[in-house]
Amino acid sequence: MIYRFNQCTIDTERYQLRLSDKIVSIEPLVFDLLAYLIGHRDRIVTREELLDNLWKGKVVTDAALGVRLKDARKAVLDSGTKQEVIKTIHGRGYQFIAIITESTAERPTHKIEAILPQQDLKLPDKPSIAVLPFTNMSVDAGQDYFADGMTEEIITALSRIPGLFVIANNSTRIYKGREVDIKDVGRDQGVRYVLEGGIRKADGQIRVTVRLIDTATGRHIWAERFQRKLDDIFAVQDEITHNIVIELQVKLVTGEHSRSIATSTNSVEAWELVIRADSLLEPIVRDDVIAAKQMLTRALELDNKYPAAWTNLGWVYWNESVWKWSSDPEKSLALAMDAAQKAISVDADYPMGYSLLGSIYMTRGDVEQAITESEKAVELAPGNSYVQAILGNVLIDSGRLKEGIRAVQKAIRLCPYPPVWYFNLLGAGLHLNGDNEAAIPVLERAVNSSPESYLPRLWLASALVELGRLDEASLISKIVLDIEPNFSAAGWAESFKSETHARLKDNMLAAGFPE
């Protein structure tokens, strides 16, 4: 259901809040609180009812409930003083009082499950694990990013271990702030094991608790608590990863393990900056990329031998070049190459650096070298969905469509709830392979998930033209030109191999885009 009030839109099916069509980042429990109050807006909702339905009877203080209410009000431009959206009825409870219009969300009628099965996933023929978002147990809710960063670091480290199937961070992020049934997680993600934990950061100390659980039985296999000085956070990550691998009986070579901590740095501040910058690089929005660039530059001032910082900075330059955001795209591409090479010079086994190299070579037209570098990234981290997706992108761009589609599908299996650009890649590959009926629902999903990005709309318009649905393609062209007024059919088509160039350009012109 979609609810609209004031400048806000809440889509309960897509689990999304928007302010004037801009997606708002919101904690899942805060979203659930808003949705519950809206769903029962015809009456006062008591404190006890909220606790029973949202916290499932868990003991929660009045202060904790108050914090969530404050966050909910802030998210919809309300406050405890104004109370124009959520009203507190003292001694009785709370009521949602803003005037609402509601509608049923229009969804693609095609069965995307035929391409992206999300149910009854079979267990891989190797140990498999999903790492749930670590809980921020600190008093300061603003430290959520710290817990999120540690979750991502552990996933990255595990994904580099041969013989271990690891679900990607984007797929497990949906569980953040929610009470979950471990058996359900195992079934939904197709894994045998789940790691969950929490982190408390205070007074220069960190305390991390972790539990490894068998999803088939719900039995705790291993639990541990780590307490270290803040400067030792990476040693804690290393130790946790090592113990998980032992419990899963995966052979680990000491030299390889020492390389599994992909983003090693001695500067906690630099690490925090990279984590924050990384969150701004998806979806690709120009202002966010600029902000990320500033953070990454500062991170490298703190530690100029930090491969993750160099790689992400390289992606910033690559985007500036590809989307013509800089006055000198060739110079930006050269800076991206320099950043990739610096990342690899620091850590010759850093897979993300090779993925970046592959994309740069592809942009330069060196197809053979692009594939070589992208395949090397996969060899270094076979369980990493990100490097699989980048390989798929390079293969699709090079014209090896079926191989590229398979690589992207493998990336999605590693990340059942993937970043939106995975769907964009898969839809583009299917379209270029002539399977437009299958491509359209995938691209529609990408558009719905990232309306501020125009790239999936381009592929969708092209596929619609080839199916003769010109009116729909024409509507899409108008939306794209509102987002990116300088877009041209020829400029976009030039990014692809020659036999694809003419086809895409003709489709764009048929959709109404300027030449």
Image (spheres, rainbow, N blue to C red):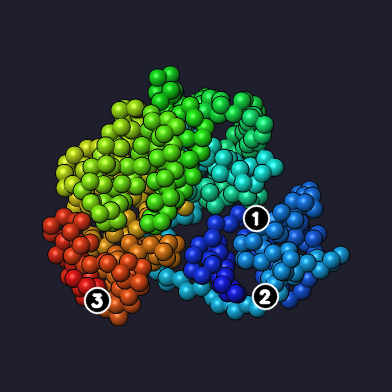
* Residue that sits furthest to the right in the current view: 91
* Sequence-first tag of 3 and 2: 2
Q: Which residue is mark 1?
A: 29
Assess disc 1: are there few (<14), some (14-19) or many (≥20) residues with their C-alpha within 10 Å of its C-alpha.
some
Quarter of the picture containing the C terminus is: bottom left
> Considering depth in this image, is 346 or 199 the residue closer to the camera?
346
Where residue 215 sits, quadrant-wise, is top right
Spatial CA distance of label 2 from label 1 is 20 Å
Where residue 22 appears, as percent x and y from the top left, is 49, 65
Residue 305: which quarter of the image?
top left
Residue 25, image x and y in percent? 55, 57
Residue at screen point 75% across, 55% down: 65
Please give the name of the residue rendered at 41% of the width and 56% of the height, measured from the top-left corner.
287
Q: How many C-alpha atoms fall within 10 Å of the one at disc 2: few (<14), some, or many (≥20)?
A: some
Circles 3, 2 touching at the beta carbon (< 8 Å)? no
> Nearer the viewer's eye, disc 2 or disc 1?
2
For label 2, the residue is: 98
Residue 450 in the image, given as x and y percentages of width and height: 43, 62
Mark 3 residue type? Gly
**Vertically, is 344 above or below 19?**
above
- Marks 3 and 2 sit apart, C-alpha to C-alpha, by 41 Å
x 29%, y 64%: residue: 459
Q: Circles 2 and 1: CB distance less than 8 Å?
A: no
Name the residue tied to disc 3: 512
Q: Secondary structure at mark 3?
A: loop
Residue type at numbered disc 1: Leu
> Type of residue at label 2?
Ala
Spot occupied by residue 175 in the image (x, y as percentages of width and height):
58, 50
Binning the other alpha carbons within 10 Å of mark 3 as few (below 14), some (14 to 19) or many (20 upward) gives some
Q: What residue do we see at 30% from left, 80% from top?
A: 471
Residue in the foreground of this view, choosing between 165 and 289: 289
